Image: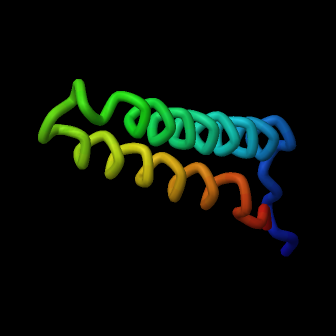
Amino acid sequence: MSKAERPAGLVITEKIVGLVLLVLGILAIYYTYQAMGELGSYWPIFIALGSFFILVGAALALAKAE
């Protein structure tokens, strides 16, 4: 029996969503760094969220389709 393959559209969408999350995470960290004074003590939350987006985005973008 042969393996069922994933549709090509889903693989491409997974990569695009991964890249979008990666860019979103980078922008979140950049703008948080720029506005650290205005954010006060809340800036670590936004840095953590941006880092999470970067990790998830990189995982989706680098995932190997089988």
Seen at 43% across and 44% down, the residue is 50
Query: Which residue corresponds to the image point at 79% horizontal and 60% vertical from the top-left?
Result: 4
63 horizontally vs 41: left or right: right
Location of residue 36 in the rendering, given as x and y in whole percent from the top left corner: 30, 35
Residue 31: x and y, percent? 45, 30
Pick the front one: 25 or 1: 25
Left or right: 40 with respect to 37? left
Between 50 and 64, the one nearer to me in the picture? 50
Place of residue 34 in the rendered image (x, y in percent of width and height, measured from the top left): 43, 32
Residue at point 87% right, 71% down? 2
Q: Is residue 65 above or below residue 24?
A: below
Q: Please give left or right for residue 57 compared with residue 11 in the image.
A: left
Q: Could you say which is closer to the camera, residue 41 or residue 63?
A: 41
Q: Residue at x 15, y 34 (%)?
A: 40
Picture colour scheme: rainbow
Name the image quarter holding residue 9.
top right
Residue 60 appears at what percent x and percent y?
A: 64, 54
Q: Residue furthest top?
A: 38
Which image quarter: residue 5? bottom right
Q: Quadrant of the N terminus?
A: bottom right
Point out the residue furthest to the left here: 41
**On-image quarter of the C terminus:** bottom right
